Amino acid sequence: MELTEIGIPGESSVPMKHARILRGPYQMSFDITNKCNFRCLHCFNRSGENPVTANELTDDEVLEFAHDLARLKLFNLCFCGGEPFLRFELMCKVGEILSASGSIVSFVSNGSLITEEKAKKLLSSGVTRGQVSLDGDNPASYERLRGVKGSFEKAVSAIKILKEAGFKEVDVAFCPTAWNIDEVESTFLLCKELGVSGFRVQPLMLLGRGKENARFILPTPLQYRELVKIINFMKEKYMFNESSNCSACGLTPNVTHNTNIEWGDPVDHLIRFPTITEHCSTSAGIKADGSIQVSPYLPITVGNIRKHKFSEYWDNGLARMWEIPKVKELAGRVASVKDMGRSDERIPTVWFDEDIEIDIIDDNLLGGLNERSKASV
Ligand code: SF4
């Protein structure tokens, strides 16, 4: 069957031309583990408990993957999870391989396992940027969501340690819940004081434990409306450009003083990517079991690096994965965060059930090798 017959643009299409120009993705996320020492009430991927946790890539498989990525000259790789510091030595080894090939390497963490020694070792291995979660300005509020006593102090201490060690960027992720929405500004100010580069807020995802605990932690529509107002107000009050002084402290602008505020809706890409006819994906995500996800919010994977190298998937049209009819169908079901938690017995529940597995190489879904692999065949 011709690919055009199942709704995928053919060999000479504009998306195919674009896909061939890219030698690899611009940026990637990699769940180096889905194990975690926390069981946060809002964890969208049920880290520590999801089906992937039992079948994680071995160290050797991860290192082989890293060498493959190094050849693609990726711009940025982010270690996600789970808690990446549970595989600390492996993180350092992958950091060395990728930074040597020119990639920027970063991580997200709950901060609880970060020590001065580890921060220095990680930095010297080439991992230069990190993000720590801090969703509250005091232990009681933070630990109510995270469930671990002493975790607030550890998160704050981790931020200080990373700053002192010389990490180029230390960001904070703040997850709004019904309990902490009043603390968004005070938490931001704490981050600003700590010299954090970016303060990232996105709506609570109604997936995984976030879905299970929604009746306690989901902000009301009114609270969300208030949150957006506060964030806009904070942007005006605390973010400044070259020509103005910092309105928080009145000092001359100084880059170490400026904490960027980001408010993003992750549903956005599920609506835009499948509908842009010439879309060519510049990012990719790998789960801890090696499967290639289209989005962490969809129950479908399009390959596994245990079957074929990541670069082979790229050469076989991975950049065009949003054109696959099943992907479009699943993404088309989500118009808001609320749709993510919708149960449907015909469709696996993300991070609870096994994903729908397709393989763009074995199923010849996107057709054609690019020029690089043609040359090497
Ligand atoms: S939210 Fe982060 S720290 Fe909490 S359980 Fe999930 S991966 Fe672990």
Image: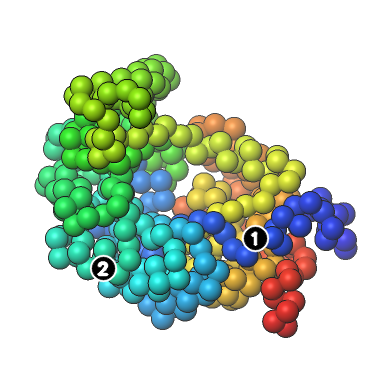
Is label 2 within 8 A of ligand 1 (CB to nearest ligand atom)? no
Q: Which mark is residue 339?
A: none
What residue do we see at 70% from left, 39% from top?
275
Q: Secondary structure at mark 1?
A: loop
Amino acid bearing label 2: Ser
Q: Could you say where residue 245 lies in the image, as x and y percent from the top left? A: 27, 23
Q: Which residue is mark 2?
A: 124
Q: Position of residue 214 (x, y in %)?
A: 38, 34
Q: CA distance from mark 2 to mark 1?
A: 30 Å
User: Which of disc 1 and disc 2 is earlier in sequence?
Assistant: 1
Q: Residue at x 16, y 44 (%)?
A: 156
Whether label 2 touches label 1, CB < 8 Å:
no
Q: Dot 1 corresponds to which residue? A: 22
Front residue (pair 179, 240): 240
User: Would you call the spot at circle 1 few (<14 residues within 10 Å), some (14-19), or many (20 or more)?
Assistant: some
Residue 59 is situated, as x and y percent measured from the top left of the image, at 38, 77
Please tell me which residue is depicted at 29% across the width and 38% down the height of the picture: 255
